[in-house]
Image (tube, rainbow, N blue to C red):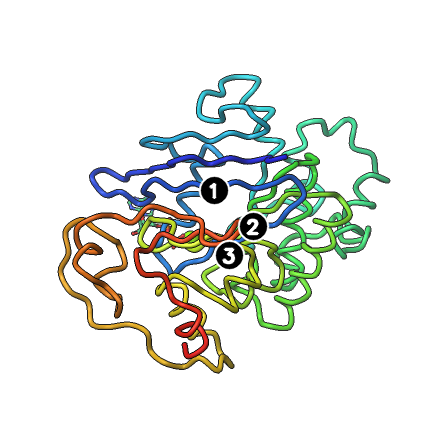
Amino acid sequence: MNLLEVKDLSVSYGKFRAVDQVSFTLAGGQTLGLVGESGSGKSTTARAILRLVEPAGGQILFGGQDVIQLRGADLQKFRRRAQMVFQDPYSSLNPRRTVAQTVLEPRQVNALATQGWLDRLLQRVGLLAEHANRFPHQFSGGQRQRIAIARALASEPDLVVADEAVSALDVSIQAQVLNLLADLQRDLNLTILFISHDLAVIRQICSRVAVMYLGQMVELGPAEEVCQRPRHPYTANLVSSIPGSSRTVPLIRAEQKTSGGCVFAPRCWKAQSVCWQQRPPMQELESSHEVACYYPLTVEEVVTV
Ligand code: ADP
Ligand code: MG
């Protein structure tokens, strides 16, 4: 069952279209990665899903309910069921609030939250009961992100959107927080939309991955398959830029002017005339592996990438 269905979502900032007809689904209990370089519209997509920015078009269904139409009490309920963890735990935590105050804030039922409940929640994210009365500055970056995760979990959400949640952390700390998220996903049957510009990080935690480029979705499929057999030229470029990748060919060419057509055509080494004229629709290549490209990489090309 899909917990989240995003259909043709578009978001504009004035005349600029930051997200352009993006569609994907996220099954309950699964982790979907959203990857793409900075400025590709990942955060804007997340903000639209959580009703932090108004879409210009499209549909967002959460448990079958149209999120964009939610008002009043239904919107409040949705806000508890869908929580966000941000990149920077320094600015997303209020420095004047203790851990207990921070974590209890979104629960909105403080009276019902017992000491035992708080202790268990802190333990759940790898903190100690005695941390409850301390302030953010008394913690390391990794610990602060655990506090942010505890706050997200406090309202017992179904969906957690983690936007670059480990990007500011050192690699060893990153791995610990990724492990925590994976444990939570499994133990609590959480559904996670995991956003990162780093495909290597996505690969560690996500079962499926969606690749965005300049506001558009270009590839969507099982994470391992997309990493091992990228079919969109842009994804192949992302894969080849993972440190340690044997695929080191720079699959990119100097930018050229474009109007309409494929959003990647100006940098694509495979672009033909149709690519400059018509936006390629998402098409299924193999079961649950889709790509928006007229000339997806062939098996031979993938091997030599
Ligand atoms: P990502 O998270 O993938 O880096 P964003 O969703 O943050 O991408 O941004 C997508 C595009 O929208 C970028 O070009 C960015 O400059 C622009 N953008 C983001 N937020 C705003 C805003 N509040 N006002 C105007 N433009 C914005
Ligand atoms: Mg972002």
Mark 2: give few (<14), some (14-19) or many (20+) Cα within 10 Å. many
- Residue 94 visible in rendering: no
Q: Which residue is label 1 attached to?
A: 24
- Residue at (44, 79) in percent of width and height: 247
Q: Nearer the viewer, residue 303 or 127?
A: 303
Amino acid at dot 2: Leu
Tag 2, which secondary structure? strand
Beta carbon at label 3 within 8 Å of ligand 2: yes
Amino acid at dot 1: Phe
Closer to the N terminus: mark 3 or mark 2? 2
Mark 1: give few (<14), some (14-19) or many (20+) Cα within 10 Å. some
Query: Whole-Å distance between the Cαs marked 1 and 2?
Result: 10 Å
The image shows residue 20 at horizontal and vertical percentages of 32, 42
Q: Where residue 32 is drawn, which disc sits there?
A: 2
Closer to the N terminus: mark 1 or mark 3? 1
Tag 1, which secondary structure? strand
- Do labels 1 and 2 touch, CB within 8 Å? yes
Q: Which residue is label 3 attached to?
A: 164
**Quadrant location of the N terminus?**
top right
- Residue at (70, 38) in percent of width and height: 154
Q: Which of 33 and 297 is in front in this view?
A: 297
Q: In this view, does 251 lie to the left or right of 210?
A: left
The image shows residue 29 at horizontal and vertical percentages of 67, 43
- Do labels 3 and 2 touch, CB within 8 Å? no
Amino acid at dot 3: Glu
Beta carbon at label 2 within 8 Å of ligand 1: no
Query: Whole-Å distance between the Cαs marked 1 and 3?
Result: 19 Å
Mark 3: give few (<14), some (14-19) or many (20+) Cα within 10 Å. many
Tag 3, which secondary structure? loop
**Quadrant location of the C terminus?**
bottom left
What residue occupies the far top of the structure in this picture?
72
Tell us which disc is closer to us: 3 or 2: 2
